[in-house]
Amino acid sequence: MALDEATKELLRAMAEAAPPGAPPLWELTPEQVRAATAPPEGAERPAEPDMARVEDAPLTGHDGGAFEVRVLVPHGEVGAIVVYAHGGGWVLESIDGFDRLGRMLAERSGSAVVLVGYRKAPEHPFPTPVEDVWSALEWAAAHAGEIAGAPGPLMIAGDSAGGNLAAVVAQRARDRGAPSLAAQVLVYPVTDADFGRGSYSEPENQTFLPAELMRWCWDHYLADEGARLQPEASPIRAESLAGLPPALVITGEHDVLRDEGEAYARRLADSGVEVRHRRWPGQMHAFLGMIDALPASREAIDYVSAFIGERSGSAPAAPWSDAR
């Protein structure tokens, strides 16, 4: 199946908006890419859906450095707490860029969402992002009553590089015996530093995240190629995946990360972990966050929210209607 029409139209618009002769992102520095991909100056991000409570909390990392989490609490009874690590190749993006997605997941699933503003490479390379997400997970577990009103199920979630971090800390929680996780949600996760997988070479996958850009991300996050093979960098290389929490794994049909995400889902299932995997047809990398451009984004948000609702014991909201 080819990319769907909405994705093709988005890619055409992005190409037309690019400055003539602009170099590819992987030939730029992280500072240049951050500037090139930042919202226009003065642009306001939509702060919706409305939340019952939004709080930014400062946390201290393993090395004494500071980072923030944003707690999004929906109206009504809160069924679970979902700690969410955003994507961006460990180098780009912020909790502000994922605020709307977090709010939608909170509203649709009836759960409090804790967005982790982990520190970014290359200023803060591996293992700092892992340690920051781990600290956020421990903090959420310790403050569950304050966040949700009462202790409830705790889950870890993330997309892309954030999916990598979510998978890693899920393994760490298992190995250390706490915090106890009710589920993990991994959306087109980075699970392996192996560029030889077939999805990396398919021409139709070289869209929002071409293979060269993924290499660029790894080079800034963890330059030592040998060190990338450790499980806390490439979680699929863990000796065992047995005993991990139930998992939802979402992949995009036209994504360079498709094969490693699906290989991780298979390994989880082969290890006796309850797994639900869905390959989203016609979609490229990062489609989950493209809320106003791609209809598949809202479909996937509903799907993730329903999974979270099931695992928390609360009923998810009704699916999006065509009129919404």
Image (tube, grey):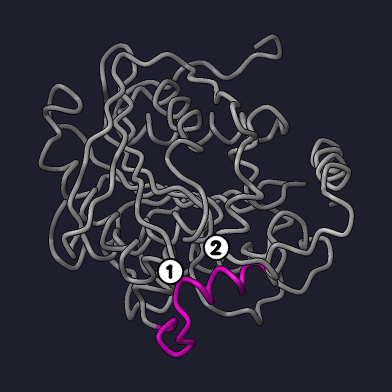
Question: Relative to 177, does residue 2 appear above or below in the rendering?
Answer: above
At a point 29% along the width and 31% down the height, the residue shown is 71
Query: Cα distance, mark 1 to mark 2?
Result: 14 Å
Question: Relative to 170, does residue 303 appear above or below in the rendering?
Answer: above
Q: Quadrant of the C terminus?
A: top right
Label of residue 165 in the image: none
At a point 36% along the width and 66% down the height, the residue shown is 124
**In magenta stretch: residue 203:** no
Q: Could you tell whether 46 is left or right of 296 in the image? A: left
Q: Is the magenta stretch mostly helix, strand or loop?
A: helix
Amino acid carrying mark 1 in the image = Asp
**In magenta stretch: residue 219:** yes
Q: Provide the secondary structure element on which disc 1 rests.
A: helix
Looking at the picture, how far across and down is residue 262, in whole percent? 57, 63
The residue wearing badge 1 is 270
Q: Could you tell whether 264 is left or right of 211 in the image? A: left
Amino acid carrying mark 2 in the image = Gly
Asked if marks 1 and 2 touch (Cβ < 8 Å), the reply is no
Looking at the picture, how far across and down is residue 218, in whole percent? 53, 73
The residue wearing badge 2 is 261
Q: Which of 247 and 257 is in front in this view?
A: 257
Q: Nearer the viewer, residue 54 or 31?
A: 31
Question: Relative to 305, does residue 257 appear above or below in the rendering?
Answer: below
At a point 41% along the width and 59% down the height, the residue shown is 120
Magenta segment, which residues?
A: 213-229
Which callout, 1 or 2, points to the residue nearer the camera? 2
Q: Could you tell whether 248 is left or right of 172 in the image? A: right
To which quarter of the image does residue 102 belong? top left
Which comes before the other along the chain, label 1 or label 2? 2
